[in-house]
Amino acid sequence: MTSSHQLRSADPEPISAVRADLGEGPTWDASTGTLCFVDITGRRVYRYDPVRKATASIELPQEVGAVVPRRGGGLIAAVRDGIAFVDEKSARFELVAAIEADNPRNLMNDAKCDSRGRLWAGTMAFASTPGAGCLYRYDPDGTVTKMVENVTISNGLGWSADDRTMYYVDSSEGIDAFDFDVESGQVGNRRRVVTVDPELGMPDGMTVDSAGYLWVAIWGGSRVHRYAPSGELEREIHMPVSQVTSVAFGGPDLEDLYITSAREELTTEQLDREPLAGACFVCRPGVKGTHSHTFAG
């Protein structure tokens, strides 16, 4: 990888006073012009309106790794015990698919929909046990299919603009690419695209911009990286917090980059140095993103 440069024109700023314990899963809801994100361990779903500069939230009955808007209304959520439907107005919570229900040591983590509206969601152990997780595909008809096994920390997902490549982060390993068949939802030919030096941190959540480049949150590294599809590190955004968790493009022009972060496991001294830890940030990196896909069910 080549050396990168700091993107000084895109200083990230917090969008609200929210300081999540483990902020994650930002996704832009184009139908409402709002951003959804979660606090995994806080069991809370947030929705931010950038026009009104207002943030609303609801609490769920269990840990929530990510939410995605449903085309028919409401949200689909990757939660501790599987996949759930959530109605924000009534706070109604319905577990529709129990996943790894026989393993209370695991929970669902990051999730995202492909262009056909299928939800991809992965699991990991609460203790980050090596190889304890898997990646699943939840189809609009309710079918659950195990797609990848022996995952340690299932994390970011993204697809190329031509829908022929799916990118996937296992934080303990790196960023992999798969050949993707958009019609069947099948993947194959797994190969490593990026390996992040552990001294720089771990790859976490991810999004793909309109040029096909990968934007990756670096947990423990106080950075967001932008990688070429070939794996070359093209640039980085320096963050005022160390535990950077995920990224998503939003706004009416898809030129706002939203970045979530965490306070989890930081010491009192670290929190004194990082008063913005747990905030969700926004910046304009001068690059246009791609739409977040909704769930077709």
Image: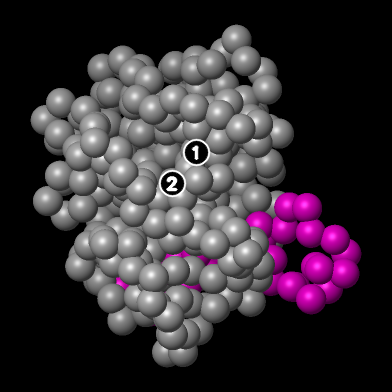
Q: Image point 57% across, 13% down: which residue?
A: 101
The span picked out in magenta is 255-284
Q: Tell me, yes or no, whether the two marked residues, 2 and 1, touch with CB atoms within 8 Å.
A: yes
**Residue 135: x, y in percent?**
42, 29
Residue 166 vs residue 94, the one in the foreground: 166
- Taking 219 as reference, is 117 above or below it? above
Numbered disc 2: secondary structure: strand
The residue at the point 79 percent across, 59 percent down is 266
Quadrant location of the C terminus in the rendered image: top left
- Whole-percent x, y for residue 93 in the image: 52, 25
- Residue 104 is left or right of residue 64, and the answer is right
Residue 11 x/y as whole percent: 50, 84
Is 265 included in the stretch rendered in magenta?
Answer: yes
Picture coordinates of residue 134, whole percent (x, y): 47, 27
Taking the image as drawn, is residue 223 in sight?
A: yes
Element at badge 1?
Answer: strand
- Which residue is farthest top? 102
Question: Dot 1 corresponds to which residue?
Answer: 154
* Res. 60 visible in picture: no
Residue 80 highlighted magenta (yes or no): no
The residue nearer to you, when weighing 268 against 15, is 268
Q: Nearer the viewer, residue 260 or 184?
A: 184
Above/below status of 68 relative to 79: below
Quadrant in the picture for residue 131: top right
Residue neighbourhood size for the residue with mark 1, other residues' Cα within 10 Å, grouped as few (<14), some (14–19), many (≥20): many
Of 20 and 107, which appears nearest the observer? 107
The answer to whether residue 104 is above or below residue 5 is above
Query: Which residue is depicted at the point 40% across and 50% down?
Result: 175
> Label 2 vs label 1: CA separation?
6 Å
Give the vertical position of 119 relative to 165 (above or below): above
Q: Which residue matches tag 2?
A: 169
